[in-house]
Amino acid sequence: MNSVFDLENPSIKNGIIAGLAGAAVTLVCYLINPKWALTAASWITTPLFIVMMVLSVKADKEGQDFTSFSDALKPAFLTYVVANLLFTIFYYVLLNFIAPELIEIQKEIALEAIEKMQGFLGEEAAEAAIDQIQGRDFSFGIGTALWTFAWGLIIPGFIVAAIIALIMKDKKPNPDF
């Protein structure tokens, strides 16, 4: 098994690839239509992260006779941690230095979603939700970035890594055969 800090480690390498590719996809989406950086980009980056997590587990399984759940979980989760860290740093730079107007667009997207759900929510609840959104701070400072990174490690990071590990682990060898 490779060292965690070794750049030859497939999990580190795949995490870097996923994080940089996610940032590139988000930037391209922003250049095409700024709203897409906040919406469509995640529909592309999420499957990309998952593919790279699976590739990390496959690479780690090579040459091993048996891969337990924890053996499969480690490379999948490490890939996600690295990718999520790079992506969060990029997102912080994007929202604070490259395209601060995305913060206001984020608020508009939230308001549009409430307006679309107004029939379901009812007029009073929709108005309360709109008031709440208009009073909310959508800025993406260091604290928010750290919170987003940490929370993302659990949902979806660890959960997806655990599902991948469950699927890719080997069944326990039967000593009777």
Image: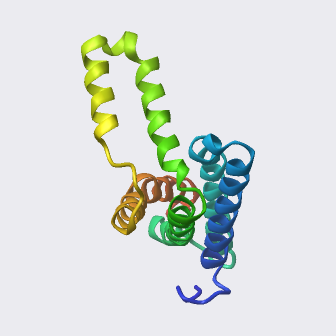
**Drawn side of residue 38 relative to residue 55, left or right:** left
**Drawn side of residue 159 relative to residue 75, left or right:** left
Residue 22 image position (x, y, % from top left): 65, 59
Q: Is residue 18 visible?
A: yes
Please name the residue shown 48% across and 34% down the image.
108
Q: How many marks?
A: 0
Q: How is the image coloured?
A: rainbow
Quick one: quadrant of the C terminus?
Answer: bottom right
Q: Is residue 159 above or below residue 16?
A: above
Q: Quadrant of residue 5?
A: bottom right
Residue 84 image position (x, y, % from top left): 52, 65
Residue 42 image position (x, y, % from top left): 59, 47
Residue 27 image position (x, y, % from top left): 68, 56
Q: Is residue 101 above or below residue 15?
A: above
Q: Is residue 173 visible?
A: no
Please name the residue shown 33% across and 66% down the image.
143
Please name the residue shown 49% across and 72% down the image.
74
**Front residue of 28 and 101:** 101
Quick one: quadrant of the N terminus?
Answer: bottom right
Q: Is residue 86 above or below residue 130?
A: below
